[in-house]
Structure formats: C-alpha cells, structure tokens
Image (cartoon, grey):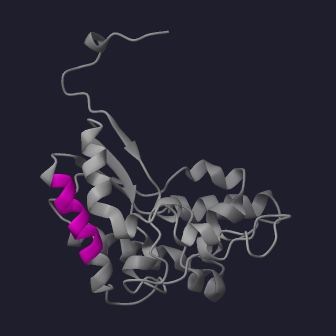
Amino acid sequence: MFFDEKEFKKDFKWGSSTNAQQFEGGHGQGGKGVSIADVRVIPGADKESNFNEFKIASDHYHHMKEDIKLYAEMGFEIYRFTIAWTRIFPNGDEIEANPEGIAFYSAMLDELDKYNIEPVATLYAYDLPLNLLEKYRGFMSHEIIKDFTHYAETVIKAFKGRIKYWIPFNEQNFIDLDSEYMTGYKAKNRAEVFQLQHHFNL
C-alpha cells in the first residue's frame, strides 16, 4: 500500500533512531565506564562472540560528524539517540559528571543543529552501569531511583534549551520479555518483574 505525501501535515518530520549500546562504540574511551551491555553473554555462543562487537558497534564515537552528515543527506529532520549513562557517570553513582562524556554529546548536538536536525534524547536503553548491578542489583533496588534521577537531572541541565524532547526509557515493556537483557538482572518470578517495573515507573 502506497501513501500520499499530501496526507502528512506540513510540520511532519521524518527521522530514525539509534541506541548507544548498539551503535556508539568507543568502549572504555573518553572516560566511559562498563555497562551491562559490555559483559552480556549470548546463550550457546563461545566466549569470544558474546557482545564484544558492541564495544565497537558502528564506531559512531569516532565517526559522529560524518554519520550525522550522511543522516542529513538522507533528508531526515529528527533524530532519536540514546545517551550512554556510563559515558556521563562511569560507575553510575558519581557526584560529578565525566566532562569528556558531556563534551561528546554537546558536539553531537552542535552537528545536529548545523543540519537543522531536531534531537530527541533517550536516557536508558539496556545499558545500566555494571557497578550499580553489582552494588545493589540495579533496578531491583529502590536505590536506583536516586542514581537515575541524578543522572537525568545532570544531562537535562547540561543540555538545557538544546534538547526539547526526552524519553526516559527505551521499550520499558521489554522487561516482561527479557528482564536480564533490559536490566542485567534475571527476574526469578512475576513478583520480581513487577518490582523492576515499579522502580522504572517511580
């Protein structure tokens, strides 16, 4: 079935999206810490496979400017990307943000502005700082609210006026399907799934 462009409003914006853990790369660079995405194991795969390719991914960390130029050439006007929590707070619970992480996303926003592309930032997409999983089981603990809120407030303040649209979590409903991929913690029963969802909602 074909669509008629006239059916779309004049202010309709075409765009696409990426998740930092699947796209950004730059593992351990610019002060970035270790997330659950860096240590995932693919069931049945050998140790070398796992998710090591995520550590490089599409290598956007090193090709950000040319990637955004290509994005603009495709005619896209809006871009939903994910900010990697561990690039802002390597362990997830520091007081002060990593300046190199802030600088990376600031440079990205400069490039998007250069091509008149509207940024939409997602704060979390399957890449919890590993330290928080080991420290208190991540989203299974009420403590996560304090650390996530600090992270959210930090980036929202840092990019105030430059990002209009914010998405707290990517595909929160995915917890029901695979809590371990989403949070690093494998829920033992439905009650634990509900506990994870409860802390996300809070």
Left or right, 28 with respect to 159, comes to right
One can see residue 165 in this view: no
Question: Is residue 157 on the magenta stretch?
Answer: no
Can residue 72 be seen here? yes
Seen as rendered, the residue at the extreme right is 44
Q: For residue 16, what is the image quadrant?
A: top left
| 110 falls in the magenta region | yes
Q: How many marks?
A: 0
Q: Nearer the viewer, residue 85 or 1?
A: 1
> Residue 54: x, y in percent?
57, 67
Image vertical order of residue 134 relative to residue 156, above or below: below
Q: Residue 78: where, in percent of width, then height?
A: 28, 42
Q: Is residue 102 left or right of residue 115?
A: right
Left/right of residue 27 with respect to residue 47 in the rendered view: left
In the image, 75 versus 121, the foreground residue is 75
Residue 157 x %, y %: 22, 71
Residue 25 location, x and y as percent? 47, 69
Relative to residue 92, is residue 70 depicted above or below?
above
Q: Quadrant of residue 139?
A: bottom right
Residue in view at x 74 percent, y 64 percent: 192
Residue toward you, 48 or 158: 48
Residue at the spot 32% in from the left edge and 55% down from the top edge: 67
Q: Would residue 59 appear left or right of 177 to someone viewing this image?
A: left
Which contiguous range is marked in magenta? 103-113
**Residue at image x 63%, y 67%?**
183
The residue at the point 36 percent across, 70 percent down is 62
The secondary structure that dominates the magenta segment is helix
